[in-house]
Image: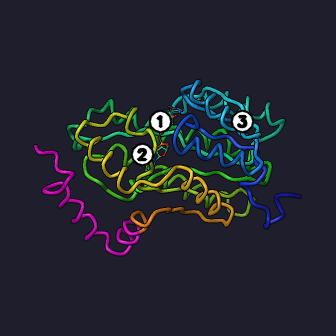
Amino acid sequence: MIGLNSGHRRSRDANAVVTGAGSGIGQAFAVEIARRGGSVVVSDINESAAQRTVDVITDQGGKAMALRCDVSSPQEVAVLSREAQGWFVGPPTLVVNNAGVGAGGQMIGDTPLEDWRWTMGINLWGVVHGCHEFVPLLRAAGYGGIINVASAAAFGAAPRMAQYNVSKAGVLALSETLSAELSGTGVHVSVVCPTFVKTNILDNGRITADLTALAARLMRLSGVSATRVARTTLDAHDRGALYVVPQPDAKAAWAMKRHLPRTYTRGAGLLARVGPLNDGG
Ligand SMILES: NC(=O)c1ccc[n+]([C@@H]2O[C@H](COP(=O)([O-])OP(=O)(O)OC[C@H]3O[C@@H](n4cnc5c(N)ncnc54)[C@H](O)[C@@H]3O)[C@@H](O)[C@H]2O)c1
């Protein structure tokens, strides 16, 4: 039985569902999972973007289908689960809760509550919905994997990004809890915390113009490709890693935050007062 074969790599020949797979990191996961022999349900709120990813996969001889799904809607994620099971003729073996949006630019107190709700609705509730629907299926099957896409923002405490930071910290805590709950079941959980990745995330978020300009510069300077993040994460998932911190700057922030948390947050405060994250106000 496949679940008892600890040598089996979950990223190979998977029946996978990837959310937000019409662009960026989600698209890279979908393409890479298909390249590793998997069948992929490519879901996205933007159906034509999802279809473009499917076209890339099928052009390379892979198997994929597009499904529109807004992850902030529990009903739509339930439909995604049903349709995916119908297409696979069984449960998925790998779920990548990736869909997310960028948000930031104002301090806590100035950030409109509507922006908080919008960000949490997609970035955190979207992952909650994905876990709520798919975890029972994987647990019952006794085999599979869940990969949640968080961010280095989960522990980075960057000023003027509270709603994004909090949403990603929630994804990190959710993934850690899920990993504990699924221990010994044959279902493995990974959570990936990248810093900058070259994607379209700055185009469709709710980010002020000055922060978008700064993030675009940093993305150009230090961003890695989405393909690299997807491959690194899938390989780490196959090795049984819970935390995937794929870039050196993210690793440095992660280590500093763990070992010198107060020094770290004082440094973040300095960025807010006099550094590039000062809002000029
Ligand atoms: N790009 C980065 O620097 C970076 C860094 C760390 C983490 N991340 C995370 O990676 C994930 C993917 O982002 P990306 O950088 O590839 O961005 P992207 O904008 O290129 O892709 C995101 C995709 O998600 C889709 N989407 C948006 N809202 C959705 C919703 N409600 N339901 C379903 N799909 C939705 C979009 O249509 C888009 O196709 C996000 O969770 C993001 O927070 C990105």
Label 1 belongs to which residue? 122
Marks 3/2: CA distance? 36 Å
Q: Quadrant of the C terminus?
A: top left
- Residue located farthest toward the right when viewing the structure as drawn: 1
Give the side of residue 123 with respect to residue 68, left or right. left
Q: Quadrant of the N terminus?
A: bottom right
User: Which residue shows up at 28% across the image and 67% down it?
Assistant: 264
Marks 3/1: CA distance? 30 Å
Give the side of residue 232 with respect to residue 4, left or right. left
Label 2 belongs to which residue? 167
Q: Would you say the residues marked 1 and 2 are in contact, meaning their CB atoms lie under 8 Å apart? A: yes
Label 3 belongs to which residue? 59
As drawn, 227 above or below 79: below
Q: What's the amino acid at mark 3?
A: Asp
Marks 1/2: CA distance? 9 Å
Q: Nearer the viewer, residue 6 or 231?
A: 231
How many residues crowd mark 1 within 10 Å: few (<14), some (14–19), many (20+)? many
Q: Circle 3 sits in a helix, a strand or a loop, which is it? A: helix
Mark 3 or mark 1: which is in front?
3
- Residue located farthest toward the front when viewing the structure as drawn: 59
Q: Which residues are magenta?
A: 252-281
Figure quadrant of residue 3: bottom right
User: Which residue shows up at 60% across the image and 30% down it?
Assistant: 50
Q: Circle 1 sits in a helix, a strand or a loop, which is it? A: helix
